[in-house]
Image (tube, rainbow, N blue to C red):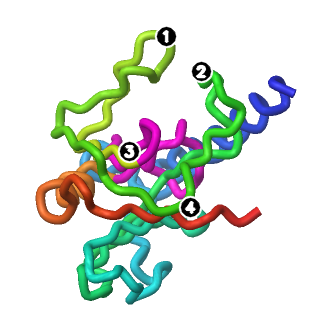
């Protein structure tokens, strides 16, 4: 079973990597990174333009459309972007067999700035960069990540990866400890 899960994870990573590398060949360089157009997508159009927020700010994560949205207290969508959520198949260095991001309604419990890093991943010593992390559920966080690993796929260990400028904006302009984070259920 573990081998099958590993093979599925490798396949997902290879598909994601080929999207980036193929884009490099066809679209050239942009700021030193392969530019593939995935950040030009209108992620706001993938989300509801208004939701019931109970009069409080809300961050909505939809792993089915690979998007996050920041909603003002009046329920209007303020900003949106690409989100890489946790996958049904874990990366090989995970102890679990299912790494999907927790579904439900949570609240940001703690935040750290640009120096945030994982104390667990990559195994065995941790050290993975998680700039502008905002923890919300069982060690899972919204956080920035290098553009190369922010893809429209669910392949993380469970955190929600965002582009670093988006995570910085969210932490400096929108989220505070206590802000609601709602993760939509995965479609099977």
Residue designated by label 3: 141
Distance from disc 1 to disc 3, alpha carbons, whole Å, reads 20 Å
Residue in view at x 54 percent, y 36 percent:
157
Question: Magenta segment range?
Answer: 137-162
Q: Position of residue 165 (x, y in %)?
A: 22, 54
Q: Quadrant location of residue 6?
A: top right
Residue drawn at x 34%, y 42% as measured from the top left: 145
Is residue 14 found left or right of 130 in the rendered image? right
Of badges 2 and 3, the one in the foreground is 3
Does residue 180 appear anywhere in the picture?
Answer: yes
The tag earlier along the polypeptide, 4 or 3, is: 4
The alpha-carbon separation of the residues under discs 4 and 2 comes to: 22 Å
- Indicate which disc residue 63 carries: 4
CA–CA distance in space, label 4 to label 1: 27 Å
- For this view, does 118 lie left or right of residue 36? left
Q: Earlier in the sequence, mark 4 or mark 2?
A: 4
In the image, is residue 118 above or below residue 86?
above
Residue farthest to the left, as pictured: 172
Q: Residue 83 appears in which quarter of the rendering? A: bottom left
Mark 4 secondary-structure assignment: loop
Above or below, 45 against 64 in this view is below
Foreground mark, 4 or 3, reads: 3
Q: CA distance from mark 2 to mark 3?
A: 18 Å
- Check disc 2 and report the residue beneath it: 93
Quadrant in the picture for the C terminus: bottom right
Mark 1 lies on residue: 124
At mark 1, the secondary structure is loop
């Amino acid at each position: 079973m573990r081998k099958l899960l590993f093979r599925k994870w490798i396949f997902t990573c290879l598909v994601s990597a080929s999207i980036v590398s193929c884009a490099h060949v066809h679209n050239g360089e942009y700021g030193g990174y392969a530019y593939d157009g995935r950040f030009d997508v209108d992620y706001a159009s993938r989300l509801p333009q208004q939701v019931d927020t109970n009069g409080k700010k809300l961050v909505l994560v939809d792993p089915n459309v690979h998007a996050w949205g920041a909603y003002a207290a009046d329920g209007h969508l303020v900003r949106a972007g690409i989100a890489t959520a946790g996958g049904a198949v874990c990366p090989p260095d995970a102890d679990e067999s299912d790494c999907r991001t927790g579904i439900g309604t949570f609240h940001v419990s703690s935040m750290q700035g640009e120096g945030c890093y994982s104390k667990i991943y990559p195994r065995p010593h941790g050290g993975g960069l998680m700039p502008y992390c905002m923890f919300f559920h069982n060690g899972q966080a919204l956080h920035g990540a290098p553009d190369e690993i922010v893809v429209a796929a669910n392949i993380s260990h469970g955190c929600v990866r965002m582009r670093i400028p988006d995570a910085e904006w969210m932490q400096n302009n929108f989220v505070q400890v206590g802000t609601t984070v709602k993760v939509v259920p995965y479609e099977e």
